[in-house]
Amino acid sequence: MSTIADRRIEDAGLEAGIARLTPEKIKKTIEAVLAGECGARLKTYIETCVRCGMCAKACHYYMSHKDPSYAPVGKVKQTMWEIINKKGDVTPEFIHQCAQVAYTECNLCRRCMHYCPLGIDTAYIMSVVRRICHKLGVTPQYIQDTAHSHSATMNQMWVKDDEWIDTLFWQEDEARDEMPNLRIPLDKEGADFMYSVIAPEPKFRTQLIYQAAYIFNAAGLNWTMPSFPGWDNSNMAMFTGDSEIMARIERQHFEAAQRLRVKRIVMGECGHAFRAVYDMGNRWLGWKWHPVPVVHSIEFFWELLTSGKIKIAQKYPGPVTVHDPCNTIRGRGLMDKLREVVNMICDGIVEMHPNREHNYCCCAGGGVINCGPPFKNVRIVGNKIKAEQLKATGVKTCVAPCHNCHGGLDDIIHKFDVGMELKFLGDIIYQCMEKPEAE
Amino acid sequence: MLKKSLMLLAVAAVSLCFFGPAAFSQEDMKNVPNEVFGAPRRPAAVFPHDAHNEKAQIEDCAVCHHGGKDGKMDKEDMTAGTACVECHPVAGAPGQTSLMRAFHKQCVGCHLERKAGPVACGQCHVNK
Amino acid sequence: MNQLYDLAVGPLTWLAIGVFVIGSLYRLAAMYAMAKKKDGPYLTYMSWRFSLRSIMHWITPFGSLGWKENPALTIVTFIFHICLILVPIFLMSHIVLWDQFKGISYPALPDGAADLMSVAVILACLYFIWRRVSDPTVKFVTSCQDWTVLILVLLTFCTGFLSYHQIGSSLVMTTLHILCGEAMLIAIPFTRLSHMIFGLFTRAYIGSEFGNVRKARDW
């Protein structure tokens, strides 16, 4: 049994942040957030929690460490209850602890909602803690850098406008070796859909853009990508607690689609981006639903495969297992379509247990992986349970249609010697589809 | 069948109550008779009639054995000798206070008023 | 003691019921007003269908992942809550008081059943106490208030049990029992016991959000 105080981690962002704090500033900021931004949800959650501890088993951190301070309710106790009990009279060091718990020991995966009889949204409570930390300027350095990038460039990876266009031209050029008339149509008004990706794709996973372009061209689709900011659908500001930047990013993304007059937005295989676009941005901006329909790749590939626009020449060999990303499964209920797609492109599924809405988190999402190297070890050893779950399937391939999940799973696969390769749906579809003859 | 035997039982109980005071000396009365309830769920309430009245300094029978008409209680009308159940049927009806309620109000009501005497369930309905 | 009993069955009862009913209604109304003012983007997703769907799964024993993964607690908690609600309402001794003071009467539980159910509540409280002491996770998050409300329930049922079995002074035990029960009623709107008032709504909200927005199960 430990507490957050026993596992303090040094982080340049957190240290610099708390060095600037005074008790008055902390109290004032906390009061402003609690009184100004929080309402009945937080109040009922804090008040009605009966401290039964049932949620402990929901959390992969708890399941990996069996330490009460990692249980969802334990995290709330070490942060929000304390903040409320002391009416904001807490020390800078305490804010450091809050930040470390909220940013690096909770993935906001919402699995605990399946354990709480009262339906308490612990992820929301942790988001409020993050919001307070953000307003106090106490955020881990690495994730704050991505939020700064969003703020300055409207994308997560400091990709400059010309670099973005250049990267798309480069991938188009590369793919033309394989499919000579392939196009990545930029700013095509009135296209059927706008394809948006996260900034790490042009930055260091360009083959994903290549594959997507190939698949869309082979299927003969009328699509486009914006040449201007709004192309990045990722949103790290959502995870730092910077709701203002979060909303700016989402508005820019939707407005890019509206400017191109597309019928809908198709999003690449990313979970947190989907959460931001589908669930978060619209609320902050005051829209009940989305001004432009939003479709995740899982669903889009399902459409392409079931409508026969893409045909599979030969299924991917060997049974695979499927990882259910929280943001598209608990966040959008795509578990059946995901399985149908995988069954159409692979040689059978060996399920992990628990799975579907009950699946264990990858331990990378929620901005945790973006907090960078200082916290890497915590999230890897904190997800032993997932490694065991993967191992138990006995298969050699895991399909995970989410960037963060890839990052998190890749780390535990290496650390715990799982011996498994990770695939995006796009990887397998590109590899196994019927390809038009190259001339 | 059940109805018939209940009726019989009721008639027997009523006649017992009616002739009871004449047939037996009040000195022998230790409990509020509860046979009329058929299968009572609590032991008969402890009630040593003469000792109670002596202690409570009740001389006038009408304090408890009151009369009444059209659902209105008449403290002047002395009804000793009439069975309680005659006016207070086991199952109450509009204008007729049920027997159990009449007993409870009579006993507990007075005890609360005078701030003396048993009031909690187990004080009267003593388990054997 | 008679006077205390008189106070307890008379004015204090009405005070307790009044505080419970008016307090609960006030808190619900205030919370709803606050939700409308501050949680608009969330309130808008509320749906009867998904609220009830979620509640139905969670009021079914083992009807959700949380219940399945905590089997002992599930069994105890269901027995506890069912008995805790049914016994006070349908206990003959309570109905007799309604009858005596207000002329209200309705069918009662058989004495044996009510007795067993009370024992069940007492045992459940003991289990909860044991859990709060021995389970590290629960111990870590237990605070003074958790003990207060748990002890309050335990005391109410213990004194009720002792009164029924006439162990100890009937008058003292019954008076204590009534006072504890009243304290419990008064505590409901203002302590953790308020999960009785708000629990259905928090569940309903998350059920609505999962059903309406996320198209996924929340059980």
Image (tube, rainbow, N blue to C red):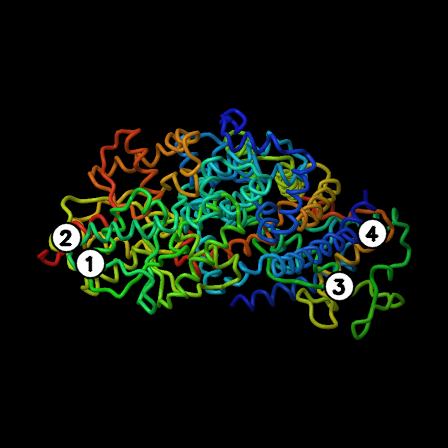
- Closest to the camera, between mark 1 and mark 4, is 1
Relative depth, front residue between A282 and C148: A282
Residues tagged 2 and 1 counted as in contact (Cβ below 8 A): yes
Q: CA distance from mark 1 to mark 4?
A: 96 Å
Relative depth, front residue between A274 and A2: A274
Q: Residue at x 54, y 26 (%)?
A: A5
- Closest to the camera, between mark 3 and mark 4, is 4
Q: CA distance from mark 2 to mark 1?
A: 9 Å
Location of residue A80 (image quadrant): top right
User: Pointer 2: what residue?
Assistant: A178
Count the marks: how many?
4
- Closest to the camera, between mark 1 and mark 3, is 1
Q: Do the dots labelled 2 and 3 sit on one chain?
A: no
- In terms of secondary structure, where does tag 2 sit? loop
Pointer 4 local density, CA inside 10 Å: few below 14, some 14–19, many at least 20:
some
In the image, residue B3 sits, relative to residue C149, either above or below, namely below
Image quadrant containing the N terminus of chain C: top right
Q: Chain of mark 1?
A: A
Is residue C23 rendered to the left or right of residue B57?
left
Residues tagged 1 and 3 counted as in contact (Cβ below 8 A): no
Where residue A379 appears, x then y in whole percent?
40, 33
Where residue C214 appears, x then y in whole percent?
41, 57
- Closest to the camera, between mark 2 and mark 3, is 2
Relative depth, front residue between A378 and A171: A171
Q: Amino acid at mark 2?
A: Glu
Q: Amino acid at mark 3?
A: Cys
Give the label on residue B112, or none.
4
User: Pointer 3: what residue?
Assistant: B84
Pointer 2 local density, CA inside 10 Å: few below 14, some 14–19, many at least 20:
some
Q: Chain of mark 3?
A: B
User: Pointer 1: what residue?
Assistant: A182
Q: Chain of mark 2?
A: A
